[in-house]
Amino acid sequence: MSRRRPRLAPLALAIAVPLSLSAFAASADSAPAEADRDRATTLDHVVVQGAGDGYKAGSAVTATKTDTPIDETPQAITVVTRERMTDQGALNVQDALNYAAGVRSDAYGLDSRGDWTLIRGSSPQEYLDGLRSSFNYYTSSARTDPYLLERIEVLRGPSSMLFGQGSTAGVINLVSKRPQAQAQREIGVQVGSFDRRQLNADFTGPLTEDGTWLYRIVGVYRDSETQVDHVDDDRRLIAPSLTWRPSEDTSLTLQLRWQQDRTGSTSQFFGWSGLLASNPNGRVPSHRFIGNPGDHYDTDRTTAGWLFEHRLNENWTLRQAFRAARNKVDYASAYGDPFSGPSNPFVDAQQRVIRREGWFADTRVRMQNIDQHVEGRFDTGAVAHQMLAGVDAVRFKQDERQLFESAQDRGGTMPAIDIYAPVYLPHTPPAFGPAVKTRQRQVGLYLQDQMRIGEHWIVVAGLRHDRAKSGLAGAGDEKSSATTKRLGVMFHDWAGWSPYLSYSESFTPVAGTHALTGARYKPQRGEQIEAGLKFEPAGRDLSFTAATYELREENRLVPDPANPNVNVQAGKTTVGGFELELTGRLTSRFDLTAHYNYLDNDKQLEATPRHQAAVWGKQRFSIGGRDGFAAGLGLRYMSAFDSPPAPTTPSVTLADAMVSLDAGAWRWALNVNNLTDKRYFSICMGRGDCWFGARRNIGLSATYRF
């Protein structure tokens, strides 16, 4: 298969699509769009005012750290609104991104330990309210529940100029629900597949008559199993927040979160045989568990912080965000070992008994994040400036006791297991050794100017300098620094057309060490050139985006082909592709989101599908003169791809569906993901293992608002 680099020319292929939309918009009987955009005046309320109803968001904060209209942002960004998450019945963040352009949401199929996504072929960094959620890999954090979120903003491509710690892939910024001035209360119940039972509640409103004090309390209580035997998905969560607004110029929001998850690992690390490759004993069922009794992945997370904003005068505003987090993960898992002999991982001639390994970890993490900046608006001649100057800092501490247990026939103590008729015997792993203590600190200074030149030209330029220090107990500190840049130019036309060209860089200090050698990881660096076209027809709640890009990076963490528990760093790599996205309201009763992604990946990197496409539509309708009914249907497609010497991961098309009824204070909904219950695989890797995709999941929910 050839590995030609895509050129900027494919963008021309995308122009035909908005041309038809332009003609459609011109024929529509609608009023011209208002010049004044409904922007929020405070950080606390930008989520609601900027988002509005429906699937199309008018503005986003992640791309510039200011409330900027998406069609005036010279970089690709996708916003998943609250309504879209609700309609699609998202059970986790990974589900919520199933229909997001440029994103491969099920990069590693079903995995109860974390939300694994890829953007443009690379793993993005996850942020919550503009502050990084975790360092290292999954054992340093906990999954964020989508019920906590007002929206998800996906910034595609390097973003270190603003965040300092975003990967080449970009940033997934989760925007939490905030206290609102208008009272809103809801209690919901969910039941569904795998004995899922969930109670969730969301209360917000004013505490005082003058609106000086506002509150919000969000809670989730869930008992659930998963599609894998003996693996639960239980959660206890409460997230209160309090806003103090002594004047129109000042706002302070205090945020707390306590979360306790009790689950295991749905990833059993089966080999190719019995999954994609033939086995004389037949297919291994997707519900098969080959771990040990008592295997678990238990997480306790507590966070506290604030969001502060003060308008100094008509032109200048000061903001600060802070969060401190403590996380504890207790992890014990026995799993298949197809890595040392991918073509034949069995210990018997009948191809039934597979070797197993064990991974055990007790991880304690403390993190502190702070970001403060000042925003100023002023003019110099014909140029209108929106200047941002800031400093952010992060401190990360991790104490981890870990143990790797190899298979019995390879000198270890982990017994093999029959994957077709498993017998679960008690097993006691060896004792932990001393904790490995790692530390990381980073401070960044950044300056950005969003310039409007005349009526149509927009220029976004930024510069940032970071200093980072990584420490390992018993060894000296490793220091690194970098200066990253960003430049974007856009021609914003009143008819709705906005072509742009941008350049951006990334610098990411990588915490942790190689699990076997103890060597510390080097910072990851990257750069991207992107050309795009955004189109929003006047008077229509509709947007179209086309983008083509080429990005290069070095030192990306990739799985070691010889050992699934170890990450190694790749050399210089190149990725290119293009993306098309259409989102909004086609008619007064029909909402749509659709995208197509093409990706040409470097051979050093993990194989990914070249083609992905998805479309979701929701139709509102009446029955017998009664309004409030809605039905949604979605299709997701992934092309086949190869990870030699593994068997080809086949292409797959999945369907999702929803029906709902809003009747007064009640909302009833039935969601079905993977409607036809396809057995599929997100990837079969060259190192020897295959990853099951999520089987059909049916959920019935009832929500009462008062």
Image (tube, rainbow, N blue to C red):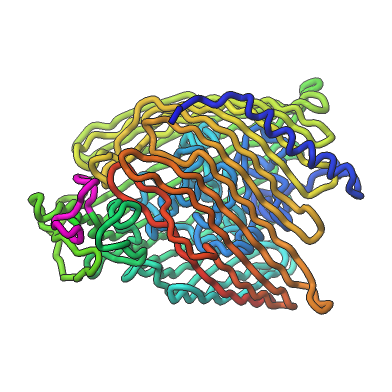
Res. 312 in view: no
In screen coordinates, is 276 left or right of 387?
left
Whether 606 is drawn above or below 451: the answer is below
Q: From the viewer's perspective, is residue 702 above or below residue 434?
A: below
Residue drawn at x 56%, y 40% as measured from the top left: 372
Please tell me which residue lies in front, 508 or 3.
3
Residue that appears at 33% across and 38% down: 644
Q: Quadrant of residue 675?
A: bottom right
Q: Main secondary structure of the magenta part?
A: loop
Give how far across and how far down residue 249 sits, in percent. Answer: 71, 48
Can residue 610 be seen here? yes
Q: Quadrant of residue 703?
A: bottom right
Q: Is residue 27 left or right of residue 485?
A: right
Instruction: Using the image as rendered, state which of residue 478 and residue 683 is in the foreground.
Output: 683
Residue 648, by quadrant, is: top left
Image coords of residue 485 (percent x, y):
54, 24
Query: Where residue 508 sits in the image (x, y, percent)?
Result: 42, 34
The front one of 164 and 418 is 418
| Segment tinted magenta in the rendering | 337-353
Picture layout, residue 547 above or below residue 437:
above
> Does the magenta portion include 64?
no
Q: 69 above or below 82? A: above
Quadrant occupied by the N terminus = top left
Q: Position of residue 608 (x, y in %)?
A: 44, 40
Residue 341 forms part of the magenta stretch: yes
Quadrant of the frame with the C terminus: bottom right
**How many marks do you count on the picture?**
0
The residue lying at 50 percent from left, 44 percent from top is 639
